[in-house]
Amino acid sequence: MAGRIPRQFIDDLTARSDIVDVVSSRLTLKKKGKDYWGLCPFHNEKSPSFSVSSDKQFYYCFGCGASGNALSFLMEHDHLDFVEAVEALARTQGLDVPREEGIQSSASQQEDRRRKEMQAQQYRAMQLASDFYQKQLQQPEGLAGLTYLKEKRSLSEGVIQTFALGVAPDAWDALKNHLTQSGITEAQQLELGLLAQKEETGRVYDRFRNRVMFPIRNVQGQVIAFGGRVLDDGKPKYLNSPETPLFHKGQELYGLYEVRQQRGRLERLLVVEGYMDVVALAQQGIHWSVATLGTATSEDHLKRIFRLVNEVVFCFDGDNAGQQAAQRALDNVLPLMVDGRHARFLFLPQGEDPDTLVRKEGAGLFEQRVNQALPLGEFLLRHLRTGLDLNQIDGQTTLAELARPKLQRLPEGLLKKRLLISLSRLTGFEEASLLPSAQPAPQAVNRPPPATRQAIARQGQTTSPIEKLFRLLARFPELAREVPEDLDLSGMDEPLLRTFLPVLNYLRKNPGTTPQVLLAYWTGTEEGEALWQRARLALELNKSAVEMEIRDICSRLKAQQGEKNHDQRYRELLNAMEARELTHEEHQELAELMKQLPPSNW
């Protein structure tokens, strides 16, 4: 649902929720004195160091330093974003989350209700289909599927239930008849991709037949589509649901819902290619993998991943197809590689996939492979220089030309700077000439003196004061108190002010706002998207250092503002002098202003 969550609702919800109830529903706590204690879910420990204070409504781990309130606990423990955590906490209180959406017409409200009812029916149909497939595993018709999962794939009953695996019987209308008896029309089943229709005859039949079934669930756990693996020699080997009102394969990741059900802190995600890879890895205890759904890893996929973790590892087969898939993933991840994020590339031995390899060598060795995966920068340089002789000028020039579009896709940050340094060493070209904006094409030149190189470096590192301020306040919004009230930014020629000023004004009116509340309030807006992009850019900064940085930025902005006001007043007095005689006070003011202005302005 679009619209912001009112701050007052968030405050009231937090006030009426008992953190002890929230935490104890997920951990075992014992009361010692005034506080409750248990084993920390965010790091491995044998002695309880995780304390929950009923008085302060706060948790703190003396082992790893994890801390926060009920909402932050839900976000960390259940791997939720802020809005999802608010909704989860509201459900425990029996509350609906309100949104600030403005006034809707009666017709618009009716349309919203109709749309929600229709969507509820669609989710019901998909869940009924999933239940049907799961029950088939216990029927004679599903014996081949159960044998495949348990004996050929060595899956436990627990993993089968976790992923809600099932089987589609070898029949043309088994699911159709079942859903029809449950009140789901043939038209609805067609719309949701559960049925297929022959164009020549118009005949309608079950899309999935004689297949092991993998339900695809959204982040709320609702079934939105299916993948099916054939149990005989039929084609295609894997069959996915088509695009439907509920399912858009370029946005969904198989296994993401299951990943988020795991307890403990989630550090990274492994992106693999198949359903069975995800399930097989989970069987071996690796519960942090997801799979794309017959498509390349898209920017939408990656945005969803980076809202959950700061590191993604792409896993590919070692053949040509795997190399091509890796290149597509590289192109899509480059624009999202802001500071604080990491991407790695893992290539498996020829003829192996995660399913076969993890069963062959076990979770420990497989995780070692993941830990040794190529960092993005190293993979990019290897990819670009493949087949080039860098001892030759032609090879160096080709590398520079190939690098330009890649660098253009990278946001400003440490990774881009490091790649520029490496490419400069490999090609012999100046760093500035490797940037996409540089014209003409790169040419080998003698290095300029140090002063010139420093000027070039400063040029490549320029970030506007407003951009810096936005990034810092997105991460530490409570430090908006350090921005002077008399600092007037509205007159600056800075496009970013359009999204920054509303956020700054909000923070000034709501002191003490947390990053989570800030992001939730602006959810679904242009300001919210700008905040999300910048909230990740200051993760490693120390709060006291940020406070000093904000003061310094504001001091420089005030100085610039003062200079602008002096210059404006100076021009006003000069213009007045041409039209009339200045007063004695104005002459004195002009003389003072002339002392403060640089000689070039006289």
Image: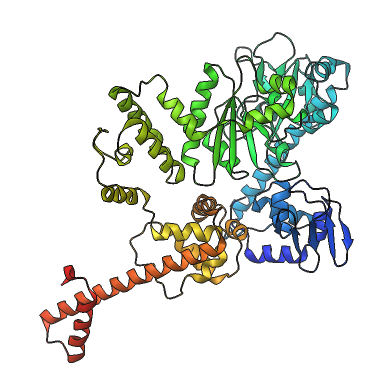
Give the image quarter of residue 141.
top right
Q: Nearer the viewer, residue 211 or 99?
A: 211
Q: State the colouring used for the structure image.
A: rainbow
Q: Does residue 228 show up?
A: no
Q: Does residue 111 show up?
A: yes
Give the image quarter of residue 183.
top right
Q: In x, y percent, where is residue 479? A: 54, 67
> What residue lies at 46% left-to-right and 68% top-to-bottom?
551
Q: Nearer the viewer, residue 484 or 139?
A: 484
Q: Is residue 26 above or below residue 576?
A: above
Q: In x, y percent, where is residue 477? A: 55, 63
Q: In x, y percent, where is residue 352? A: 65, 17
> What residue lies at 78% left-to-right and 30% top-to-bottom?
164
Give the image quarter of residue 313.
top right
Residue that protrudes farthest toward the bottom in the picture = 584
Q: Nearer the viewer, residue 328 or 341?
A: 341
Q: In x, y percent, where is residue 321? A: 53, 18
Q: Is residue 599 above or below residue 307?
A: below
